[in-house]
Image (cartoon, rainbow, N blue to C red):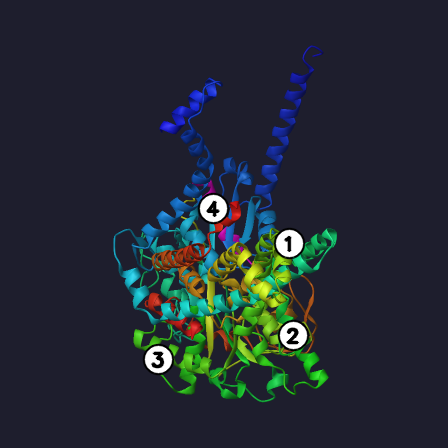
Amino acid sequence: MRPAAYSDCSATTVTMKINPQTVSWLQVAPLTVVLLVFFGIPMLLVGAVSFFDYERWQIVPTFILDNYIELFQSSLTLRLYLTAIKYVVIVWAVTLVVGFTVAYFLVFHVRSLTLKMGLFLLCTVPFWTSNIIRMISWIPFLGRNGVFNSALIDLGVVQQPLSFLLFSDFAVIVAYVHLNTLFMIVPIFNSMARIDPGVIEAAHDAGASRWRVIWEVVLPLSKTGIALGSIFVITLVMGDFFVVKIMSGGQNATVVSALSTEIASLQYPPAAASAVVLVVIVALIVSAILRLVDVRRELTG
Amino acid sequence: MIKNPKRANGQITRRRLLKSAAAGAGLAVGSGLVKGFPTVWAQNIKDVKLVQVGGSYSAIIDIGRQASKDLGFQVEMQTADHDALMNRLVNEPKTIDIADTEFFAQYYMVGRNIVQPIPVNKYKWWDKTVPIFTKGEYPDGRKVSAQGTLPYKVQYLESATAKTFAKGPTDLLSGIPTVYNADTLGIRPDLIKRKIENWSELLNPEFKGKSAIVAVPSIGIMDAAMAIESRGDLKYADKGNMTKAEIDKTIGILIDAKKAGQFRAFWSTFDESVNLMASGEVVLQSMWSPAVTAVRSRNIDCYYVPLKEGYRGWGSCIAPMAHLSGLKLDAAFEYLNWYNSGWQGGFIAKQGYYSSVPENAKKFLTADEWDYWYEGKPAKDDIKDPYGHLMEKAGRTRDGGSFWQRMGNIACWNTIMDEDRYMVRKWNEFVSA
């Protein structure tokens, strides 16, 4: 309440000096309001519902821990998290390698600024179409009678079409990598572009090999970009259920798949409990990343 | 007059308007379009708009258009898949006027009083309705399988606020039966090259990596149970209401099959099932009747194979939402009567679904169409879909045969189990196994 009162005063008497504390309050106010309304309150509601009981046709407002107990006692929960983490780790590693390589090439090997920006924009071209179209177009490509298998058979590489290409973990990972690599490229590109070329020249002059320069100079100085890209990729994969459903042919599930099956069956309280646990786990992962890399210092520095 | 031309004009216009409105109302009443309405309502009935929300196979825009034309008020169709529909019915009931759901959804709808019952005397086709719905019997008096949600079990109510269903016929209907069908497996005869006669083939290792089931837990588990029972692993007391032990065993068998690579995919949309079959990824799977036709329309052979153990039946119903009253509720009753008066039945027959009042639907089908869809006779002419596109060539007989050959052999009905909560958990285990 106090900051609001101060701000009224400042509005009427222009010459009056604004308390610096008030300025800070005002600066954070819009974001705080947005976060409260669109994240805080819904999250509180989800948290409340996670303690409710339910029957076939109604939610019973009460306070029970059963939803959490069921969640933690079920071996399913562990399996779902292991599946999700498996996808996260693989997708993260692949997008990191691809993202880092592409960004490195763009920043250090392309001399002309115009060409650099042109190629960078080219990376975003696939994103002009919808996520779903980009994902679904893999299905006719990877199927048993799809383009890729037909080509392999015509070339005599294989006799029988490869089944593991579609409706498998392989297909899920291909789609995730395709959908998410850009989120790695952009922040890493941004970090690398800020590296002073003089630093790299100095390393070369001091006799460092190209790999050593990458490992000891470029990589540490791109940490912020890698951290930001990782946060994007990890949260997107952890929160997905659609890609895994379509690309695994419904034969695999992650945490959110199970949650969506529960919502579809109108079982809101256990779905809310899994949502709360998922949010906590993702928050822990993100805070661990932020602890490893001081994003704030690097961004302002 | 010169001083105030506007007013003079206004009077003339108003008088002319009143006159034509009266004539219009007279015409409407005279032509029998607006039946059962006090004439005073005939004038504002055209302002009524009913929103029906249901599955894409039933809430069809053409039906809404025809109803609006015949009834003189507006009927708007909106489609939603089952999950979205259930969530909307429960959470935003006031955005819907006519609920269009499968019969098993009545457990939610009546349990929460989301819909209101229809007095039998407000609905004029009840004595002409197929006895599967009215009595739970076939015309020869045999009882219809009550495994799962046999519509008859949720058809009657004791009172308007009842949360459970009446044991036998009463004067209150929980909903009006609309479309229904008998579901079975779809196969690719060109790739299988032998006779398929039992549900157990779904789990036959011969089709390893080439079979699929529907990903809706409550329906997928029934198809699996049909296969398991047919293979002889397990005999269910009620496939539509399994015990926890039965669910465990069923899911156990499914997990083993999945780990052995039996299934190519679990599909969740109509298009997915069509593409799996048309591309040859799958040669045998759970399927819906129009999906089989959709595969055939690509000149790929596909057969909706009748199986010895029988069909998995399903049926939809429509009911006015609880918030309707007065003029809108009367319009809704009028609409329910229109719905099964024939036009809709003729339309959906050409998509392979049945009407609950077949004799009305018959009026809107040619003799050849009736013989093909209901009588199981070979088509004399090409069979067209409701939009006039070629569906089947002359000479073809409907897969599974006549109405009673198909509907007379229902083994179980789409449902929601008492142990639904447990089953959904186990299903998730199966999917992630």
Label 4 and label 3: CA atoms lie apart by: 42 Å
Chain letter for mark 4: B
Magenta region, main secondary structure: helix
Q: Which residue corresponds to the image point at 51% horizontal and 67% vertical from the top-left?
A: A244
| Place of residue B123 in the rendered image (x, y in percent of width and height, measured from the top left) | 45, 54
Residue B340 covered by magenta stretch: yes
The one nearer the camera, B119 or A231, is A231
Could you tell whether A62 is left or right of A204 in the image? Answer: left
Q: Which residue corresponds to the image point at 40% horizontal and 81% vertical from the top-left?
A: B253
For label 4, the residue is B95
Q: Choose top left, top right, bottom left or bottom right for residue B378.
A: bottom right
Give the secondary structure at mark 1: helix
Using the image, tell me which numbered label, if any, was put on residue A59: none
Q: Which residue corresponds to the image point at 62% horizontal and 67% vertical from the top-left?
A: A209
Label 2 and label 1: CA atoms lie apart by: 64 Å
Which amino acid, by three-letter code, is at mark 4? Answer: Thr
| Place of residue B391 in the rendered image (x, y in percent of width and height, measured from the top left) | 67, 70
Q: Quadrant of the N terminus of chain B?
A: top right
Which amino acid, by three-letter code, is at mark 3? Answer: Lys
For label 2, the residue is B296
Q: Residue furthest front?
A: A206
Chain letter for mark 3: B
Q: Nearer the viewer, mark 2 or mark 3?
A: 3
Could you tell whether A9 is left or right of A101 in the image? Answer: left
Please state the extent of the stretch shown in magenta in the rendering. Answer: B326-342
Which amino acid, by three-letter code, is at mark 2? Answer: Arg
- In this figure, what is the number of numbered marks? 4
Marks 2 & 3, CB-CB < 8 Å contact = no
Q: Is residue B182 above or below residue B345?
A: below
Q: Is residue B12 above or below residue B254?
A: above
